[in-house]
């Protein structure tokens, strides 16, 4: 087609000028179409008949209609892609974790729960139907072989996960009994919260001792300045994860 001519609709050739492979460029409101001269019927007067030109316009309109139809088919596909993208985002969306490396000691009775400083985590859910997965790992020692109780707290000291009170028996989140002053027991707990909000949520841990004696975080009660593991320091952690469910 190197020698073929592009012939405009307003400058129709004489029949003697046309050879196979030439094409006609048709410009219409709906767009531009390139049509081979083999598709034309040439009149006796060596001009293209008006009826054929009208037919060409109909063909161009038909092509435009097909393009519109294809475009309409693309839109649902785009919607499906957006839906799939949203589904991919389901699962763990963000994780916040705090490691408490220092120690903390208080003297506490069983009716006085104290929030453990620096053992908390704040997270802001991205959706109102997200759930928050909470995992606590706490190392605790106490002055006597006694029970240490724990309460998970939220925001303004809301004791949001605990057992029901039963008569004089108070409901708490979990507890541990240290058998000796040399012990530093690790206790763990995990649960799910449904905040139903995109406001920041702050979770923490409070503890109390049955015998109103000293209780310690990250160390045993018995302590000596030596490298012996009996007197080593440990860590506690608090981790929250936002899980998007839909």
Image (spheres, rainbow, N blue to C red):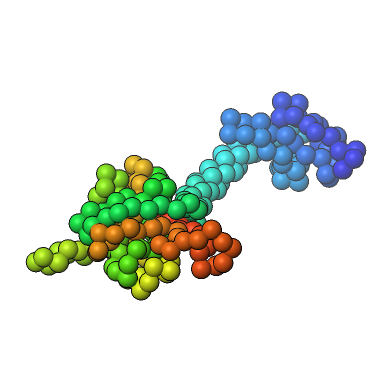
Kindly indicate the quadrant of the structure image that contains residue 164: bottom left
- Residue furthest to the right in view is 3
Is 132 or 175 nearer to us in this picture?
Answer: 175
- Residue furthest to the top in view is 10
State the quadrant of the C terminus: bottom left
Left or right: residue 14 compared with residue 61:
right
Q: From what the image shows, is residue 177 above or below residue 238?
A: below
Residue 36 in sight from this viewpoint:
yes
Give x and y (percent) for residue 40.
Answer: 71, 42
Q: From what the image shows, is residue 133 above or below residue 7?
A: below
Please give the count of numbered marks on the rendered protein. Answer: 0
Is 200 or 158 nearer to us in this picture?
Answer: 158
Q: From what the image shows, is residue 98 above or below residue 171?
A: above
Give x and y (percent) for residue 168.
Answer: 11, 65
Left or right: residue 98 compared with residue 201:
right
- Residue furthest to the bottom in view is 179
Kindly indicate the quadrant of the structure image that contains residue 211: bottom left
Q: From what the image shows, is residue 146 above or below residue 106?
A: below
- Identify the residue at image location x=29%, y=51%: 114
- Residue furthest to the left in view is 167
- Identify the residue at image location x=45%, y=59%: 218
């Amino acid at each position: 087609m190197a020698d073929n001519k592009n012939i405009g609709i307003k400058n129709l050739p004489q029949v003697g000028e046309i050879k196979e492979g030439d094409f006609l460029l048709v410009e219409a409101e709906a767009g531009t179409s390139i049509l081979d001269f083999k598709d034309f019927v040439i009149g006796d007067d060596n001009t293209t008949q008006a009826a054929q030109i009208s037919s060409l316009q109909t063909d161009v309109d038909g092509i435009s209609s097909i393009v519109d139809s294809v475009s309409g088919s693309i839109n649902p596909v785009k919607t499906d892609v957006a839906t799939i993208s949203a589904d991919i985002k389901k699962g763990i969306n963000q994780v916040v974790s705090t490691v408490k490396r220092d120690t903390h000691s208080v003297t506490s009775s069983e009716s006085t729960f104290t929030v453990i400083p620096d053992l908390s985590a704040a997270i802001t859910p991205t959706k109102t139907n997200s759930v928050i997965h909470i995992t606590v790992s706490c190392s605790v020692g106490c002055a006597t072989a006694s029970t240490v109780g724990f309460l998970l707290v939220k925001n303004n000291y809301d004791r949001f996960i605990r057992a029901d009170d039963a008569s004089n028996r108070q409901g708490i989140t979990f507890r541990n009994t240290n058998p000796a002053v040399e012990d530093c027991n690790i206790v763990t707990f995990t649960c799910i919260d449904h905040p139903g909000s995109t406001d920041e949520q702050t979770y923490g841990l409070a503890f109390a001792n049955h015998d109103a004696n000293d209780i310690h975080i990250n160390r045993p009660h018995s302590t000596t300045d030596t490298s012996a593991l009996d007197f080593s320091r440990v860590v506690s952690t608090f981790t929250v994860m936002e899980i998007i469910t839909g």
